[in-house]
Image (cartoon, rainbow, N blue to C red):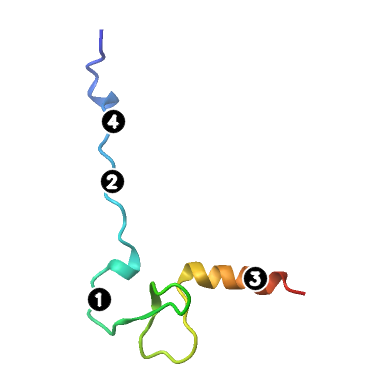
Amino acid sequence: MPSTDPYCVPEPPAAPDPGPAAAPDAGEPRAGCVECGRPTEYPAARPGIVRCPVCEWQEAQRTACSG
């Protein structure tokens, strides 16, 4: 016989977090990553090479292992 306990009913999955890149932003537009093109945490007016968090981490791994 199936359980009728209301505490055993699974909750529906939570909506995925859109993250900071997908959040509506009233400020400046975000710069695109120079490697993959995804939005970064930096404003478009920032000078220099900008990378998304994933590409920044990968670059840090490459430079840390070069000896």
**Image mark for residue 25:** 1
Question: Residue 14: where, in percent of width, then height?
Answer: 28, 46
Q: Quadrant of the N terminus?
A: top left
Query: Is tag 1's residue or tag 3's residue first in the polypeptide sequence?
Result: 1
Residue holding disc 4: 10
> In whole angstroms, how far apart are the C-alphas of marks 2 and 3?
35 Å
The residue lying at 55 percent from left, 68 percent from top is 57
Q: Residue at x 51, y 70 (%)?
A: 55
Distance CA(mark 3)–CA(mark 4): 43 Å
Q: Earlier in the sequence, mark 4 or mark 1?
A: 4
Q: Earlier in the sequence, mark 2 or mark 3?
A: 2
**Badge 3 or badge 4: first in the primary sequence:** 4
Residue 47 vs 40, above or below: the answer is: below
Neighbours of disc 2 within 10 Å: few (<14), some (14-19), many (20+)? few
The three-letter amino acid code for the residue at tag 4 is Pro
Residues at marks 2 and 3 touching, judged by CB atoms closer than 8 Å: no
Question: Three-letter amino acid code at disc 1?
Answer: Asp
Circle 1 SS class: loop
The image position of residue 54, as x and y in percent, is 49, 67
Q: Nearer the viewer, mark 2 or mark 3?
A: 3
Could you tell whether 61 is left or right of 37 in the image? right
Q: CA distance from mark 4 to mark 2?
A: 12 Å
State which mark lies toward you, 1 or 3.
Answer: 3
Q: CA distance from mark 1 to mark 3?
A: 32 Å
Crowdedness of circle 3 by 10 Å Cα count: few (<14), some, many (20+)?
few
In the rendered structure, find residue 62 and report the number of the disc placed on it: 3
Residue assigned mark 2: 14
Query: Reading the chain from its start, which is encountered first: label 2 or label 1?
Result: 2
